[in-house]
Image (cartoon, coloured by chain):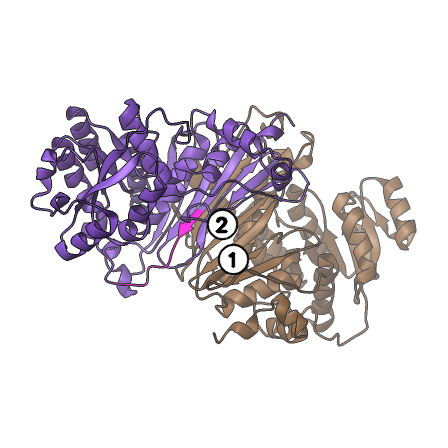
Chain colours: A brown, B purple
Amino acid sequence: MPHDHAMLTRRDMLRGAAGGMLAAGLANPLITAAQDAPKSDRKIGWALVGLGRLTMGELLPAFAQTKHCKVTALVSGSPDKAKKLAEKYGVDQKSIYNYDNYDEIRNNPDVDVIYIVLPNSMHAEYTIRGAKAGKHIFCEKPMAISSDECRQMIDACKQANKKLAIAYRLRYEPYNQTAIQMVHEQAVGPAKVIVADAGFNLPDPNAWRLNKELAGGGALLDIGIYALNATRYLTGEEPIEVNALIQENPTDPRFKEVEESCVWQTRFPSGILANCSTSYAYNWQNRYRVIGTNGFFDVDPFLAYRGLRMSVKRGSAEPEEVQLPQVNHFAAEMDHFSQCVIEDKEPLTPGEEGLMDHIVMEAIYQSAREGKTIKL
Amino acid sequence: MPHDHAMLTRRDMLRGAAGGMLAAGLANPLITAAQDAPKSDRKIGWALVGLGRLTMGELLPAFAQTKHCKVTALVSGSPDKAKKLAEKYGVDQKSIYNYDNYDEIRNNPDVDVIYIVLPNSMHAEYTIRGAKAGKHIFCEKPMAISSDECRQMIDACKQANKKLAIAYRLRYEPYNQTAIQMVHEQAVGPAKVIVADAGFNLPDPNAWRLNKELAGGGALLDIGIYALNATRYLTGEEPIEVNALIQENPTDPRFKEVEESCVWQTRFPSGILANCSTSYAYNWQNRYRVIGTNGFFDVDPFLAYRGLRMSVKRGSAEPEEVQLPQVNHFAAEMDHFSQCVIEDKEPLTPGEEGLMDHIVMEAIYQSAREGKTIKL
C-alpha cells in the first residue's frame, strides 16, 4: 500500500501525523498554497458588494480570521443597513457606495479587491464595472448565469489587467484538499465512480434564487454546482460526456420558474464516471463518495460551512474516520486571493474555473432538454 | 409526524415495538406474505439445477431453515459432485439428473419446483424445459439474457399452467421490506431522489460472468440489477426515462467482452429520480439512500447475504440506526414460493418482475450505445 501515507485516519492523528499529512496535501499542485507562510504582513482592502445573509452571517465576521484582508468598503442598495454594518466592522462611512455610484470606487485607494456577493444575474455587470474601476474581482459562485457572461468577465479583467477569482471556498479547506490528494495518489486505488449529492430545502417562494431572471437557473446553478465542481477538482479532469434528467415540479409554487431537482452523470477522460444530484426540495444532502478499486472514501458533509467529516474504507477493513483541521473557508479563500494580489500570482480558482462549470451546467440543461448525451 | 410509527429505530426496539413494525410492514401490498402463518405443514420438493457456489454455499444449507421446502433432486453436469451433495443433503441418488436427461424429471413425483441456478444464458432453456416437464419454476436473477427470452419463459410457464418466480431475495427480508414500507408511508416525506450503488470486484478473468455468451452482459446484468430492482420496488413504480453511460475498459483482460462499469439514471412517473451505479471493478458498494423532503434513509449494505443495516435521518435529528430481524434470504424466498404452490397464489416476484428489469436494462444499454434518453 504505497499510498497509505497520503491518508490521515484517526489512528494517524493519534500518532501525531496530522502535520505531515497536511503538508503532503499542499505539495499537490491541485491544492492551494493558501496556508503557505505569508511573505508580507500587508493587508489587502476588500469591498463587499451586496449585504445579504452570506455577507452578514459569514463574510464580514470572517475578516477577523484573515491575515491579509481588511474590509474597507461596502456597496448596498440599503443605506441604513450599510451604515450600521460599516460602524460595526470599522468601515469608513465615506466608503459606502450604492449601485448608482458604485463606479466611483475607482477613486478609493483603500479598495484593492471587490467581492461580488449579489444575485447571480448581477455578477457579470458588477465584475465588469469593478474591473473597469481598476479593482481585482472576487466573485461568488455561480460565476454568472451563462458561459457567455463568464467569458465577458474574464475578458474585462484581462483587459483591465486585474485578477479574477471565483469563491469556490471548498478548494481552500483541508477536507476537500485532502480528498483531491487522495484521488491523485490513488489512496483507495484508481478512482472508478464518484457519487456526489448536493441539495437543500429552500422554503421561501419569494427567494431570489427561485426567480429565473435573477438566478439564471434552479438548484443546479446554486447548490448542484458544488457537486459538479467537486467531481472536477477530485478528478483533476474535465467531463467529456454529460447526461441529465430534470424535475421541474411547477405545481409547487416555489418552482414556477426554475427546476426543483436535477440528476446528471458525467464521464471523465480517464474513464471515471460520476453520478450527481441536486435539489431545492430536500435538506441534508451534501456528501460525495469516491469509489476506487481498493476501497472508497466519503466526505459527508463536504460543503457545509463548518463541521466537515471524512471516512475512508480501505479493503475489507472497517471504515476509519479522518480528522483534519476545521478552518474558516471564507477567511481561507479571501486570504489566498489577497496573497495572489500581494505576490502577483494566479489564483487557484480563476474565472476559467467558473466558466468551465457553466459550460458543463449548460450541457446538463441541454442534455435534459434534448434528451441526449452532450459531448464536451 | 404521522408516519413515525412506520419507522423502527433503535429506540423503538428498546421500547419493544419491533413486532408491531414488522406486522405493519407486512400489511403493505408491496411486501411479501412470506412470514405469514403457514396454513399447511406440507413440504414442497425442490430440484436444484446447477451446483455452483451459490447452490453449495447458500441454497443447500438454507433448506434446513425453511418450513415448506425440501431438496429432492439435483441436476448437474458433474456426477461426482452431485453424488456427494446428494449424500450430504439426503437426496435420493435416483433423483440426480444431468443436462441430457433433465427432462426425465417430469417422471419424478418428489419434485414440485425446479430452481434454476445456471449461467444466465441457460435460464430460458432450462425454465422452458422444466415447465414442459410439469414443474413450477424458480429462477435466479437475472431472469435471462434478453426481454424476449423472459417473454418466452413466461409464456411457457403459462401454457404449462405452472408458476414462475424470479429469485429476488431482497424482497423477502425485513430491511428491504421496511424500506419499501417507509417510502410508501412517506416516512422521510415524499421521496425525491434515490441513489443506489451495487458493485463488486470480480478478480477471475475466466469467470463465466465475464463471458458475453454465457452472461449476456456485464456488471449491470449481474449486480447492477440489484440497484435497478431496488429503485423499482422502493418506488413501486416503473421508470419512464433512462440515461446511461458505460465504461468498457477492454484493456483490462477481464473486460474484453462485457462492460466493467455503468452509471444510469431513471425518472419515475411520480417525479422520483434515481441515480445508480454498478461495476465489476470495485468492492463494498451495495447501498442505497432514499432522499425525501423531510430526511433520508440508507440501507447499507442492502444486498449482502447477511448483516444488512439501515439508518434513518429525520429532520435535523442525528441519524438513528434501525434494527430489524436478520433472516436467511434464501430460506425466506423459497418458503414463499412453496407457499404459493401450496395455496395456489401468485408469487411476489413473478416472471413479469424479471421481464421488467430486462426491459429497463436493455434501455440502459441502448441509452449508452445511442447517446440518448430512452423513454419507456
Q: Is residue A178 magenta?
A: no
Looking at the rendered structure, the secondary structure element under dot 2 is helix
**Decide: marks 2, 1 in contact (CB < 8 A)?**
yes
Q: Read off the residue under disc 1.
A: A232
Whether residue B342 is situated above or below residue B232 in the rendered picture: above
Q: Nearer the viewer, mark 2 or mark 1?
A: 1
Whether residue A178 is situated above or below residue A203 in the rendered picture: below
Q: Percent x, y for residue A346?
A: 63, 68
Residue shown at 46% from the left, 28% from the top:
B26
The mark found on residue B65 in the picture is: none
Q: Percent x, y for residue B14?
A: 64, 39
Whether residue B46 is situated above or below residue B89 in the rendered picture: above
Residue B110 appears left or right of B34: left
Segment tinted magenta in the rendering: B197-205
Image quadrant where residue A162 sits = bottom right
Q: Which chain is mark 2 on?
A: A
Whether residue B44 is visible, yes or no, is yes
Q: Read off the residue under disc 2.
A: A360
Q: Percent x, y for residue B50?
A: 20, 48
- The earlier-in-sequence mark between 2 and 1 is 1
Residue shown at 50% from the left, 48% from the top:
B300
Q: Which amino acid, mark 1?
A: Arg
Residue B21 appears left or right of B365: right
Nearest the viewer among B99 and B364 is: B99
Q: Percent x, y for residue B315?
A: 66, 37
Looking at the rendered structure, the secondary structure element under dot 1 is helix
Q: Which amino acid, mark 2?
A: Val
Q: Are the residues under badges 2 and 1 in a single subunit?
A: yes
